[in-house]
Image: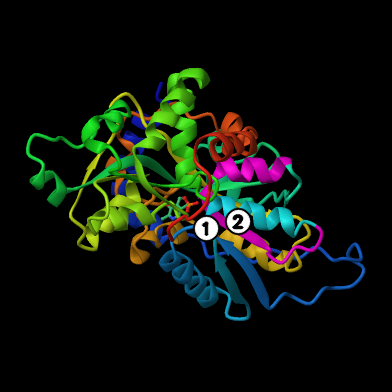
Amino acid sequence: MVRFGRTHGVLFTALLFGVLLMAACAPVPVPATAPAADGGAASVAASTELNLLCTPQVQWCEGMKAEFEKVYPDITVNFVRMSSGEALTRLRNEKDNPQFDIWWGGPIDSFVAAAQEGLLQPYDSPNLDNLIYPDLYKDPDNYWAGVYVGSLGFATNQNWLDEHPGVEPPRSWDDLLKPEFEKQLMVAHPSSSGTSYTALCTILQLKGEEEGWNFIRDYANQVFQFTRSGSAPARFVGQGEAAVSIVFSHDIVAAIESGSPLVLTFPEEGTGYEVGGMGIVAGARNLDAAQKWFDWALEPATQELGPKYEAYQAPTVKGAAASRPELLEVNLIDYDFDYCGSNKAAFVDKFTNEIAAADNLKE
Ligand code: PLP
């Protein structure tokens, strides 16, 4: 079942010891050359702007902007933070007049869908060689590359547990259907959130489509409120608005680090995971700057910046240490990104039309 969970664990431990030495030797980013629009007859002025569609939490987007601008002081990064589904819709709407140059972050299911719809362009970055598992962490035709990895977990409010003696935090997907959790789940809507889409597609893979959709119908009935953003439910559950949220475990760790009274558990029969993606937008106006970002984001030193901005996702490149390797040392399913990416539009439509509309989403 586990494609790389244990391998990752061993690898991360080894990397932990080797990383300081390797980080010290981390290569300086090599500026990429912009292909000349005229085929190379005349040189093209280097871009001074980069328009970034940024899907992770806003602190990390701000941090990455500042770090990139330190390395490339001649480029100003303009970013907009959007959840995965919203970002995909935006790219679809702007297909004939793209406003963004590069999309960074959010589960690759959406990048698989975007590449199939002609919204991304391939880039054969020299730093693709840095990827630990190229088969898993990049598109075969280089339309996207993975920039982080994270597993799904459950966050339960400890104060709520104290007020409900005998109730245990969920340790199985089926536990979410227990009567004590009726209207006590808080989760993002899969139309807007890549996190929630990962949960939906995990259930479909674990249970099969027929049983999976029945389960998802019952699970949606347990939900007190849907949010737009995938990580927001951890914060709301920390504030006591509901008892349990289904969120990426690194976001639960971030909420705990910032003082939320949350208990992190995992479904023992297997949990889904994400590879956070990155891809250059088809028709990007600032292609040279987008390629610089792409190369830079695949540097070990760049991927080790996460914890500075409360991002505890695991890196995808060799020579970068995971800040929380234990988050991947759990029972991970053999998540099929092609299946989930190719079916994303259909599964989201089915959920929205037949189970829970995307109206009145909180934050
Ligand atoms: N923010 C963080 C911190 C994440 O880890 C991820 C996952 O890729 C996302 C956002 C994705 O956002 P959403 O679920 O809102 O699409």
Image quadrant in which the C terminus is located: bottom left
Identify whether 122 is placed above or below 330: below
Q: Nearer the viewer, residue 85 or 300?
A: 85
Is residue 204 at least partly visible in the picture? Answer: yes
Tell me the residue that label 1 is attached to: 55
Magenta stretch encompasses residue 133: no
User: How packed is label 1: few (under 14 Cα within 10 Å), some, or many (20 or more)?
Assistant: many
Mark 1: C-beta under 8 Å from nearest atom of ligand 1: yes
- Give the SS element for disc 1: loop
Marks 2 and 1, how far apart in space?
8 Å
At 57% from the left and 70% from the top, the residue drawn is: 79
User: How packed is label 2: few (under 14 Cα within 10 Å), some, or many (20 or more)?
Assistant: many
- Magenta part of the protein: which range? 96-116
Q: Quadrant of residue 340?
A: top right
36 with respect to 257 (left or right): right
List x then y, in percent, for residue 198. Answer: 47, 39
- Give the SS element for disc 2: helix
Q: Nearer the viewer, residue 22 or 52?
A: 52
List x then y, in percent, for residue 20. Answer: 33, 57
Task: Pick whichever of labels 2 and 1 is earlier in the sequence.
Answer: 1
Tell me the residue that label 2 is attached to: 87
The amino acid type of the residue labelled 1 equals Thr
> How many numbered discs, if any?
2
How is this picture coloured?
rainbow
